């Protein structure tokens, strides 16, 4: 707060420099101008200034994709270990050992190879053209596939839902890293 006030006073005295907005969660730095117009720009969190070096649309697309995958991964890792639901595929090991067990269960990576093939096909048919369209002048917003068959958005504004998805995705990415680390030490649920 004090730093922002000092910058504003200095800019008013000089008269030549525009007043920069301080980042909400990183107040020792100005919010990068490249974030303007994107969900979460009011927080202004980009301490490494990556948005000034790489196209923000590419960065936001990658962040949303990794966040969505991490949200699914957290649930997919915990649910079988907690005994809430499991597939009857003959592999009964804790999730931390599931990769090795699936790869050893058959040719071409076993069940995990089938998942990899399915995800690769979806990415090639849907993801790649969408990102190509967005990066070369299309009007598509990063992460928007116009896919909401259950109408979960409801009457909530687009920006509010985008900010929620960003924050939940960031939390899931951190959570998954913590879960994997803890499961490496104590493989049985609840991992301690």
Image (cartoon, rainbow, N blue to C red):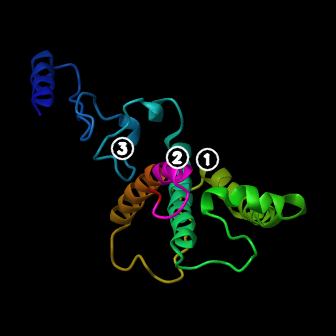
61 sits to left or right of 32: right
Taken as a whole, is the magenta stretch helix, strand or loop?
Answer: helix
Provide residue 106's location: percent of width, then percent of height: 87, 64
Provide residue 62's location: percent of width, then percent of height: 56, 48
Q: Residue at x 52, y 79 (%)?
A: 84
Q: Residue at x 68, y 61 (%)?
A: 98
Stretch of the chain drawn in magenta = 176-190
- How far apart are labels 1 and 2 at the CA level? 7 Å
22 sits to left or right of 148: left
Mark seen at residue 36: 3
Looking at the image, can residue 160 be seen? yes
Circle 3: element type: loop
45 sits to left or right of 96: left
Looking at the image, can residue 129 be seen? no
66 versus 155 height, above or below? above
44 versus 2 height, above or below? below
Q: Nearer the viewer, residue 181 or 14?
A: 181
Decide which of tag 3 and tag 1 comes sooner along the chain.
3
- How far apart are labels 3 and 2 at the CA level? 12 Å
Q: Are marks 3 and 2 in contact (CB under 8 Å)?
A: no
Looking at the image, which residue sits at the far bottom? Answer: 150
Q: Residue at x 71, y 57 (%)?
A: 99
Mark seen at residue 57: 2
């Amino acid at each position: 707060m004090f730093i922002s006030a000092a910058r504003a006073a200095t800019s008013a005295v000089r008269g030549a420099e525009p007043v920069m907005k301080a980042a909400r969660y990183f107040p020792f730095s100005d919010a990068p101008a490249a974030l303007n117009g994107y969900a979460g720009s009011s927080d202004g969190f980009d301490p490494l200034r990556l948005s000034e070096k790489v196209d923000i649309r590419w960065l936001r697309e990658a962040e949303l994709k990794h966040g969505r995958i991490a949200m699914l991964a957290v649930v997919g890792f915990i649910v079988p270990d907690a005994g809430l639901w499991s597939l009857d595929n003959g592999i009964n090991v804790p999730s931390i050992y599931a990769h090795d067990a699936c790869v050893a269960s058959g040719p071409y990576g076993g069940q995990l190879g089938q998942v990899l093939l399915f995800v690769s096909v979806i990415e090639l048919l849907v993801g790649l053209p969408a990102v190509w369209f967005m990066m070369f002048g299309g009007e598509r917003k990063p992460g928007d596939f116009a896919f909401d068959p259950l109408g979960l958005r409801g009457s909530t504004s687009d920006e509010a839902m985008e900010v929620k998805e960003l924050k939940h995705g960031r939390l899931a990415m951190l959570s998954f890293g913590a879960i994997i680390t803890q499961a490496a030490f104590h493989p049985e649920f609840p991992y301690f």
